Image (cartoon, rainbow, N blue to C red):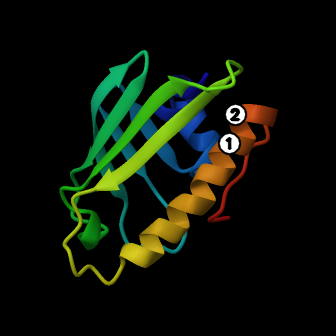
Amino acid sequence: RIIDALTSHDGIRSWWTPDAIVTTDALDLGFPEAPARFALSVDEVAADSVRWTSKGDFPPHWVGTEVAWQLMDHPSGSGSQIFFSHSGFAAADPMLGHTAYTWAMLLAQLKAYLETGAEGDLFD
């Protein structure tokens, strides 16, 4: 279910943005206030991991960065846990705080979707 939420058209649209075009090798994401679409390549999809690379020129501070998701069994033995990273930013990137905050909100939305099936759109 987690891999599907990170790799399928319906999955991405359910927790990130409804303006998503998802293929096996790319994510094309639109947001109401964004002047351009986000373009990410899907570099890896395995039973326990997903990895994307930002390929577009928007947002500029994302260019060439990598988003990685690693799934593991929860230590309690019930459910799963996700290790998330978004790496490759310039050391002095002034947008890093904004990006971290947005991902925190998105991860909460992903968690809610996975646990309850509730769909959400932060950018609506």
How many numbered marks have been drawn onto this rendered protein structure? 2
Q: Compared with residue 56, is residue 68 higher up or lower down, i.e. above or below? A: above
- At horizontal 36% and vertical 79% (from top left) the residue drawn is 95
Secondary structure under tag 1 reads helix
Q: Compared with residue 112, is residue 63 higher up or lower down, i.e. above or below? A: below
**Left or right: 107 with respect to 85?**
right
**Left or right: 50 with respect to 116?**
left
Q: Residues within 10 Å of mark 2 (few under 14, many from 20)?
A: some
Secondary structure under tag 2 reads helix
- At horizontal 25% and vertical 71% (from top left) the residue drawn is 60
88 or 41: which is nearer to us?
88
Q: Hey, what amino acid is under mark 1?
A: Lys
Residue 15 in percent (x, y) is at 63, 45
Query: What mark, if any, has residue 114 been given in the picture?
Result: 2
57 or 91: which is nearer to us?
91
Residue 80 in percent (x, y) is at 61, 26
Q: Residues within 10 Å of mark 1 (few under 14, many from 20)?
A: some
67 or 60: which is nearer to us?
67
Structural distance between the alpha carbons of marks 2 and 1: 5 Å
Q: Compared with residue 119, is residue 65 higher up or lower down, i.e. above or below? A: below
Quadrant of image for the N terminus: top right
Q: Hey, what amino acid is under mark 2?
A: Leu
Residue 35 in percent (x, y) is at 39, 74
- At horizontal 81% and vertical 35% (from top left) the residue drawn is 116
Find residue 112 and report its image quarter: top right
Find residue 96 and report its image quarter: bottom left
Q: Which residue is mark 1?
A: 111
Residue 27 in percent (x, y) is at 37, 42
Quadrant of image for the C terminus: bottom right
Q: Compared with residue 124, is residue 33 higher up or lower down, i.e. above or below? A: below
Q: Given contact means CB atoms under 8 Å apart, are the residues at marks 2 and 1 in contact?
A: yes
